[in-house]
Image (cartoon, helix red, strand yellow):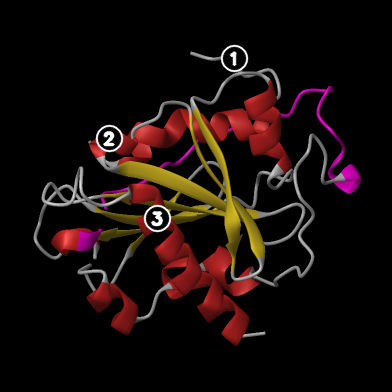
Amino acid sequence: MRIRELLTAVVICLTAAGCTSTSVGEPSAADHPPSSRTTEPSATEPPADGLPADGAPRVANPLDTTAYQRDPCQALNSEQTRELALEDQGTVEEGDVGLICEWRSLRGEPAGVDISSLDRNPYGLTGAYRAQKTGVLKLFEELPEVEGHPAVAYGRNDQRDAGVCAVLVGMTDQLTFEFAVRLSAANVGSVDPCEMAVQVAGMAVRNMKGDQ
């Protein structure tokens, strides 16, 4: 099963306040991440101009990620994909909340990395904090900042023991990118998939900052 199929339900909860609970290829990396179905925000959600809310941190130094929203495969360069033992070229797919780039393991395993632009979720990290408050998320951990940007590990189910983790990084108060990892079988149990997702996020954010 691909990462996006494992995590799809999570992104729904970021855009719907009423949601209720219901190197990657080598010894160091992940599969293919979440997508999401479109759900209209409810009237109880905070207005986008009132963000952050629900305890979410403010993004002190917003990034212009327009180019990466149009093509999230630009987020990693070829040197980084080699380091992560991923295919050099990722594949872009349309998700309901934004574009997704998927990189598969060079070893052909069900492992890899997905980077998703959640630009049709106008609530940024507030969506995840709201989902946590409603009890939807089984995994929700605030993380150290990624290159100066607030981040959380989250999931409707906690699948870290299976080598799967998704990390959200706030690029602005209204926009997050998601970095999802599925570890190779050799790494499950010995590598923390959330730490790997943070590593991938750090690479991508450094690249984005280099373009500012």
Q: Which residues are magenta?
A: 28-50
Find out whether residue 135 is within the magenta segment.
no
Q: Secondary structure at mark 3?
A: helix
- Marks 3 and 1, how far apart at CA: 28 Å
The residue at 62%/19% (across/down) is: 19
Residue drawn at (83%, 39%) of the image? 53
Mark number for residue 147? none
Q: Is residue 202 left or right of residue 186?
A: right
Q: Are marks 2 and 1 in contact (CB under 8 Å)?
A: no
Q: x and y percent of residue 137 in the render? A: 54, 26
Q: Earlier in the sequence, mark 2 or mark 1?
A: 1
In the rendered image, the vertical position of residue 79 relative to residue 10, given as above or below? below
Residue 38 belongs to the span the image colors magenta: yes
Residue marked by disc 1: 20
Q: Is residue 76 visible?
A: yes
Which residue occupies 85% across, 34% down?
A: 46
